[in-house]
Amino acid sequence: MKKVVVTELKKTLNSGEISSVYLIEGPDAYFRSFALETLETALIDEPSLNIAVFDGGNYNGGDLFAMLTAVPFLSERRMVVIKEFYPKADALKGGIGEFLSSPNPKSVFVIVNENTCETLKKYNSVCVVSCNIADTALVVRWIKSTAGSAGVRISDALAEKVAEYCKNDMTRIKTETEKLIAYADGGEITEEAVELLVSRDTEYKIYEMTDYIAKRKFDMAIRVVSDMLGKGETEGRIISAVYNYFRRLLFVAISDRSNAETAELLGIKEYAVRKTKEQAAAFRVLAIKNAVDRLGDADYAVKSGRADADELLWINLFKIMTE
């Protein structure tokens, strides 16, 4: 099994390193689509005649194998794509397993998965294209490059703010960057435009609310929650989000692991760990634990229909503010 990060895929293809099987996997939908498009552009002529797409949740194994062994038309290769394909080892004992073990050099088999599949990684023919959430430095470079290509300027600080508001989700960042470019006045993206146009991720809003509480700016914290409610979030979802965030705060507050180890355990970036540690330091550990206990009870009560979400949301927020 070989492995390449999505941002290096085009360079790898240009150097002539071409695999017969690509497993595109990772949580970032934009990068998954980008990887697939990169492979199609680089490897396939006459795509309308030489690309077949299957749904991994509903496919015919015989049809899939037939496409993998078919002869390309007016192209050096043909491509067979299957999305969300997580086979068990037993399911690969037939034709598809034979292809993975000994691929047809005229076909490229592309598997596009949001989650990982260890079964597929056991084959030497497979090249894994990693599509994880990008780090902030990469996102900032992408935003600045995209804006620059459109003749628009944006500072590093504002590009980083866009990345933070979108939690480094490239699908959202692409949309928000396009809005900012269209709105740019005089060829420059301003802070006012970012604040006006960029929709904050729910997790970021919870971080922002908690930061205001830590700084004793309770009116601003209330304003953030009110804004979330005004834009369609429900009280129940906010309780769940605050509960999960304070669980992270508690873990970070009591953990003696390094930032890198903590980031891997929580599935977040080291930058997020550092920010979380800064917030956790502003609260007493006992206060965080009490908040987690109360929020856990509130989350269960709301989901089981035993209590009113609106009342529990504000009661718990005021207790966090005053403890």
Image (spheres, rainbow, N blue to C red):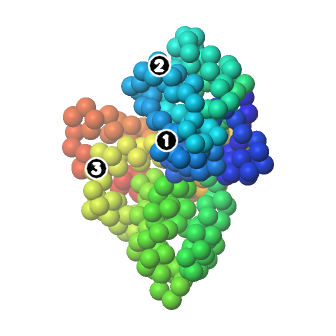
For the N terminus, the image quarter is top right
Position in image of residue 28 (x %, y %): 53, 47
User: Viewer-proximal residue, 97 or 1?
Assistant: 97
What kind of element bears circle 2? helix
Q: Which residue is mark 2?
A: 61
Q: Which of labels 2 and 3 is toward the front?
A: 2
The Cα–Cα distance between marks 2 and 3, rounded to whole angstroms, is 46 Å
Q: Which mark's residue is nearer the viewer, 1 or 2?
A: 1
Task: Mark 3 and mark 1 in contact? Answer it, CB < 8 Å.
Answer: no
What residue is disc 3 on?
A: 235
Residue at the image position 46 percent from the left and 66 percent from the top: 176
Q: Is residue 161 above or below residue 87?
A: below
> In the image shown, does 255 or 165 lie closer to the viewer?
165
- Tell me the kind of residue under disc 3: Glu
Could you say which quadrant of the image residue 198 lies in?
bottom left
Rounded to the nearest angstrom, the CA distance separating label 3 from label 1 is 51 Å
Q: CA distance from mark 1 to mark 2?
A: 21 Å
